[in-house]
Image (spheres, rainbow, N blue to C red):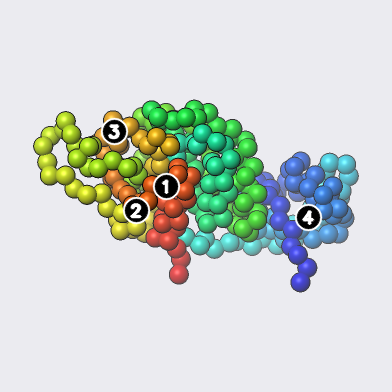
Amino acid sequence: MKEERYFYTPQPERGELPQEEAKHALRVLRMGIGDEIKLMDGKGAYYRAVITAATGHRCLYAINEQLLQERAWNGRIHLAMAPTKLNDRTEWFAEKATEIGFDRLSFIDCQYSERRNIKNERIDKILIAAMKQSHKAWKPELDEMMPFRKFVEEVQGVAQKFICHCYEEEDIQQGTAAQQPVSKPHLKDVLKEGDALVLIGPEGDFSVEEVRLAERLGFRSVSLGKSRLRTETAALVAVHLMHLANEVG
């Protein structure tokens, strides 16, 4: 079977591949007029097309067929994380989470964050590459980094909101109104089908104050198990659990 070549074009109706995709098609793959290609718009559709012109850095095509992709999961899967100190770990997460399937990635600047900026352009390229590699027609949304407080105060319309941290509940409740401490449930035991958002903190975890703020705003504290996970590993586990809770049978 002839291998299909996938290219990302957010505006397929334009009839021309974006510059980076055109370069890959013409210079790397040595494709030319008459070659068949498969496009993905990142919004849930594939397109079968054929190259009609290939000159310099430009690659034009004609669409022959639109193919809508069935989503492999229900609800909207949203992960918000503090970027890791080493960029490659955040990039690894972005790639692997896209291969699994999720809808939105947000970056949050926390009290103990070791990285307070992120190059979204680089992350976006990784999302696109992973989308193409895993043959998904859905590209995750990517948000600019936002201060933790601003993020948790402004997020709306999500019924299931969770914050993962390593504190005991008595640590969080200390200094608040007296109540019986409740053990944190495992995320897998409380997730239900539907929209969900999970917060993952930096290497030094969220601060107690951040956890208390999130809980006051409707986030539920959860655990990811007894093992102490790196930020990017915890984030991937959370995405996978949300995906499993929403997986289409």
Q: Residue at x 53, y 46 (%)?
A: 93
Q: Amino acid at mark 2?
A: Gly
Q: Amino acid at mark 4?
A: Ala
Query: What label sits on residue 67 in the rendered view?
Result: none
Query: What label sits on residue 62 in the rendered view?
Result: 4
Question: Nearer the observer, disc 1 or disc 4?
Answer: 1
Between discs 3 and 1, the one toward the N terminus: 3
Direction from residue 49 to residue 222 in the image, left or right: left
Disc 1 + disc 2, Cβ < 8 Å: yes
Direction from residue 166 to residue 230 in the image, left or right: right
Query: What label sits on residue 225 in the rendered view?
Result: 2
Between 57 and 221, which is closer to the camera in this rendering? 221
Q: Which residue was labeled with disc 3?
A: 208
Disc 3 + disc 2, Cβ < 8 Å: no
Mark 4 and mark 3: Cα distance apart in space: 56 Å
Q: Residue 63: give x, y in percent of width and height.
A: 74, 57
Residue lying furthest front: 227
SS at mark 2 in the image: loop
Mark 2 and mark 4: Cα distance apart in space: 51 Å
